[in-house]
Structures are given as structure tokens and as C-alpha cells.
Amino acid sequence: MPSSGPRAVLLLPLLLLRAVLAVPLERGTPQQETPATESPVSGPALLSSQDTGLYYHRYLQEVINVLETDGHFREKLQAANAEDIKSGKLSRELDFVSHHVRTKLDELKRQEVSRLRMLLKAKMDAEQEPSKQGQATRDLAQYDAAHHEEFKRYEMLKEHERRRYLESLGEEQRKEAERKLEEQQRRHREHPKVNVPGSQAQLKEVWEELDGLDPNRFNPKTFFILHDINSDGVLDEQELEALFTKELEKVYDPKNEEDDMREMEEERLRMREHVMKNVDTNQDRLVTLEEFLASTQRKEFGDTGEGWETVEMHPAYTEEELRRFEEELAAREAELNAKAQRLSQETEALGRSQGRLEAQKRELQQAVLQMEQRKQQQQSQNGPAPGPEGQLKFSQDTDDAPVPAPAGDQKDVDPSEKKVPDQPPELPRLDTQHL
């Protein structure tokens, strides 16, 4: 059964929503900045050029750098405008990015959410305005909602791929694949009882097995202090989620084929939300010592019933939602196929054009060669060929005979008109008698 799916489906709309709701840190008096001289930006620069007040510039740039490593998404991102991003149109393209890109995006999200949680606690320590605390709280709540939606799409894609795989098989192979799937689901359901998060049984199990303390001497206040890792007087979301590791290990093992780690992260989030709903009375996403001690006095703290119902007992989607999702995938697949066909046609046209250019090139080369040959023939008929440095070469003639005129240019000349070379004058003889 396919176990991979889309990650970070709602990442970019979430980023913009955070940019609207985020609480800026105290920055002091703003300094006068020089006017910008750059031209208007679009695409990736449109995202990375925004100053959101929570140091999102670095985070957004890292996200964009990762997304631009995917060729298909880079093309869509370059052509995107602000409306495409705000409306969520661009986020649908994240369903088609490669697996390693989704993995990097998940890691960036975890780091950014961790930073937001630290920021929220810093805001409370600084006793800032409650309205600003509420903005950061709503920001984190929006992240959780986006995570649930992302998980739903992941589960629908996984089911869609499973059904298509089964349809591609023959009857006997399909029966064997279905039998194997049922066996995996059976093994996954066979696990120890999962305690309700935040219950006495769950906290005592952590107290005994992780803290190494006597379960008969369980003390809620001591437990709170032990697990307030940074000693800031509250249990934040990360510190709470660390308490659920033991329960999650009962159900999910990364070594087992039937255990989906994406489902484990969704389970962790559901557990944390359950505790926050029952313990965090002021809904600031932080559990104080007073809130924690008050929760241990309620009836529900000791009465856990049948235990915690895991995520496979609560389907993330309906059949109607799956049908609409499959229609969306089919439309996107048809769009990609049409684009691939256009690109193939353009490639063929370019190949034909290149062939014509090559033929023209050969014709020109042949014409140049013929011109050179004719030129050499004319030179051999009209005169001696030039030397290596362009000078003319003449053959030596010892008789100094005149060069006959070319044929056709000679005329009949009367012998009397022919000039005889003049004889040199005779020198007078000397009279030797007078010497």
C-alpha cells in the first residue's frame, strides 16, 4: 500500500495568514530608511520581500528556496501573483512536488512553529497586551487546523492510490493484495491499551517508566515541575507532546510496514488538543501549575473508560470528500497531460526546424566550396598562382624572350614595321702612333 502523500499542502496560505496575524517583537523606534529603488516584484520575490514582523523574511526565503528546487512548482511560482497566493490557488500545486521537497518543507514548518511557541511564551513573560497574545494564539490554532486539513488530503490521496492500484491488478492478484492489507490493519490494531492523554493512568505511567519514580507516590505538583523543562512556570505544547511519546510508541513503530508515521504525528496533535481543551481553561495554549493541579481534581482525571480512541477509529474524510478530491486530481492530471502533449508537439516542431536549418547549413557550405573552386580555376587561367604570402611568382627566362600575346589578341604585322634593336654606336679608334 502506498505510504507517501502530499506534505505542506496549505503552507503558503498559512504563511500569509501568519503574516497578517503575527505579533511583532519590540523593535524600538523605527529608523528612517532610504527609499527603495527596486522595481515592483512578483512571484517568489513577492513573498520574500514582505516584512511580517516575526522574522518571516528568513523563513519565507528558505521555503521559496526549497520549492524552487522542484521544476514544476518553480514554473508556477514564477508566474504567480499576490491574488493566486492569497486565494490558495498556488497551494494546490504542492500536491505535486517531489517527496524530498515535502520532507524539507515539513522540517522547516516544525522549526518555525517551535519558534512561534517560544515567542508566545516570551510575550507572556514580558506581560504584553492581551490582544497581541490572542493574535499569536490564533496564529498557532490556524496552524493546527491547517495540519488537520493537510492530513485529510494525505489520507485521501493514500486511499485513492490504493484503489487505483487494486483496479490495475487481476482478480487473483487483487484478492492477494486485499488479504495483505487486511493483515497489516489487523497487526496495527493489536497494541496495548492507550491511556487517555492527561489522565491519571497516563501521567502515572510517565512518572514510573520515564521518570523512574514510585507510582504509589505520584505527586501532580512534582510531576509538573519535573516536566517544565525550561522552568518557565508553564507547560507549553512541546513539553506536553513529550508526555505522549510512551502512548504513541504502543501504536506506532517506524520499523513496521503497517504503521504510518504521518498518522502518528496526527495522533500526537489530537492528544495535545485533547489536553488543552480540558486543562487550559484560559485557552492561551499554555498550561500553568494552577490549571494543571485543578485538572487532577476532576472526576475525568481518574475515570478513563476504555482508553483513548486512535486516529484509525475516526476517519479523516467522508466518501463525498474523497469523490471531490478524486475529481480534482483527475482535472489536474488532465491539465498536466495536455501540457505534456503541447510540450511534445513543440519539441517535435523544434526538431523539424533544426533539421531544416541543418540542411540549409549544408547547402551553404557546398555553395561556398564551389565558389572557392571556381575562384582557383580562374586564378590558374589568368596568371601564376600567388605565393604563400600573397606575392606573385614568375619563372626565370634566360633568353629574355618576349612573352607572346594571348591567342586572339595577335595581329598580322608587316615585317618592315618590325623594329630592329638599335646597334650600339661604334667607338672611334685611337691612333697609337701619336701616343
Image (cartoon, grey):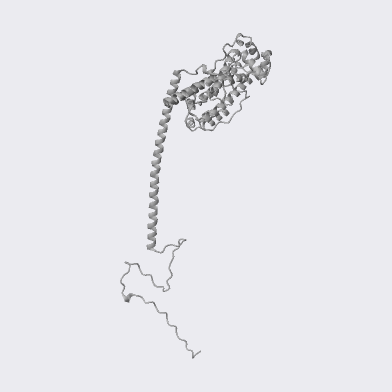
Closer-to-camera residue (141/22): 141
Q: Can you say whether 418 is above or below 308 in the image?
A: below
Q: Can you say whether 356 is above or below 124 in the image?
A: below
Residue 241 in view of the camera: no
Closer-to-camera residue (274/381): 274
Q: Write down the quadrant of residue 251 in the picture.
A: top right
Q: In the displayed orientation, state which residue is furthest to the top.
A: 299
Give residue 97's position: percent from left, percent from top: 49, 29
Q: Write down the quadrant of residue 284 in the picture.
A: top right
Q: How many marks?
A: 0
Q: Can you say whether 228 is above or below 33 in the image?
A: above
Closer-to-camera residue (49/345): 345
User: Which residue is depicted at the point 32% across and 76% down?
Assistant: 415
Q: Write down the quadrant of residue 426 in the picture.
A: bottom left
Residue 59 in view of the camera: yes
Q: Can you say whether 230 is above or below 337 in the image?
A: above
Give residue 269's position: percent from left, percent from top: 56, 19
65 relative position to 398: left or right: right
Give residue 392's position: percent from left, percent from top: 44, 64
User: Which residue is depicted at the point 55% across and 26% down?
Assistant: 106
Give residue 210's position: percent from left, percent from top: 65, 20
